[in-house]
Structure formats: structure tokens, C-alpha cells
Image (spheres, rainbow, N blue to C red):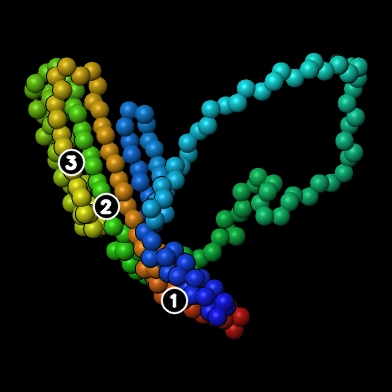
Amino acid sequence: MTALYILLALAALVAAVLLAPVGLRLRYDREGLAAWAILGPVRLGLGKKKPPKKKPPKPAKEKAPKGKAPKPPKGNHSAKPGGESGDAPPPESGGTLAGLKVYLPTAKAMLGAVRRRLTVRRLTLLVNLAGDDPCDLAVNYGRTWAALGSGLALLEGAFRIRQRRVEVACDFAGEETRIYGELVIVACPARLLAVAIRYGWQLLKIYWNQKKGGADA
């Protein structure tokens, strides 16, 4: 019975991991860009710098007597494999375009399937236009809304957006335009795994067929 309980616990843990939402939260404000990784109910900050620790002063080192450094032994040094020598590979080493094109339809379908499984939980964009000339502000106001309308149409056609807030305001006393943005996008790991298995198998078959054709040739 103990082994059965362990298996059930592992199965429940795997199911929880596969069904818990994962994603990314981005925010832009006066402090700059901030990012968090979403792992179920957990939020992990990305790229946060810790304050530098003060190091104790190092004791002064005694100066070594002056002298000439020994010369390295002469010899032929061959370049390291894998392009580590810094030289660019010759153009003749590239593959043909036809060999790459066979992957593109499946890769495009895979990206489309991944996109359809992403959900935008929250999209916030607040633009505060600054300027002391009412005419210029009116022109910028119209241009801003036109640009935002085009961008939002593309986003809504590509993703499912649950909550959206987009506003444009005018500040006659402001010195420069301010922007506040926030994007929270999530996905279900189980659905992404299904996409990876389906299209990954198709890409693998194309790869095998290419290798088989090259071997037969």
C-alpha cells in the first residue's frame, strides 16, 4: 500500500505541475522594465539586482622585482574546433535553402498552435501625453489612438485577451510623455506539451527522411 500511495502522490504532483498556469508578467513604469515568472501561485522576480556588498580592504601586496616575463614557447597552434578561433565559417559550409524549407510549414503550424494556447490575462497601457500647446497635443492624441488601435487589433487577432485597459490622457503641465504598461500572459503546460509532442514528432520524421535520403544518395 505504501508504494501505491507514493505512486498516487507522484501522479497528483505531475498533474498539478502540468495543469498549473505558467507565464510571464511584464511591467513598465518610472522605475523601468520589471519582469516576473509565473509558476502557478508563485511569482518570481527576474533580473533584480542585489545591492553590492562592501568588501574589506585587501592588504597591500609586496611588489615583485622587475624583470622580463618569460616568452611562450614557439610552435604551431591549431584553431580549436567548433569555431572557437573567432574566424567566420566560409559560405560554402552553409546548407541549401531547399533543405531548410521542408521544415518551415510544420514550424509555422507549431508556432500558430502555441499562440492559440496563450492567454493574456491582463493588458494595461496608460499614455500621458505632455505638452503646453493644445494644437500639438490634439494632433498627438489622434496619432496615438490610431497607432494603439492598429496594435490592439493585431493583438486581439493573435491572442485571447481577458482584461484590457487602454487610456490616453493629456497633461498640459507635464514636461515629458509618460507611459505605464503591464502585460500578464499565461499558458497551460499540458496543452503546450501536447503541441510539442505532436509537431515535434512531425519535425523528427522530416529530419529522419532527410538523413535517409542523404544516406541513400
Relative horizontal placement of residue 6, taking residue 164 as reference (left or right): right
Q: Nearer the viewer, residue 197 or 109?
A: 197
**Secondary structure category for the residue under label 2:** strand
Q: Nearer the viewer, residue 45 or 146?
A: 45
Up the image or down, 91 lies above or below 85; here it is below
Q: Which residue is mark 1?
A: 202
Q: Amino acid at mark 2?
A: Arg
Residue in the image at 75% along x and 19% along y: 58
Quote the CA–CA distance across marks 1 and 2.
31 Å
Residue 179 in picture, x, y percent from top left = 26, 32
| The label number, if any, that marks residue 121 in the structure image | 2
Residue 67 in picture, x, y percent from top left = 91, 19
Up the image or down, 40 lies above or below 62; here it is below
Q: Residue furthest bottom?
A: 216
Disc 1, disc 2: CB below 8 Å?
no
Q: Looking at the image, can residue 200 be seen?
A: no
Q: Nearer the viewer, mark 2 or mark 3?
A: 2
Residue in the image at 49% along x and 78% along y: 205
Q: Amino acid at mark 3?
A: Val
Disc 3, disc 1: CB below 8 Å?
no
Q: Which residue is mark 3?
A: 166
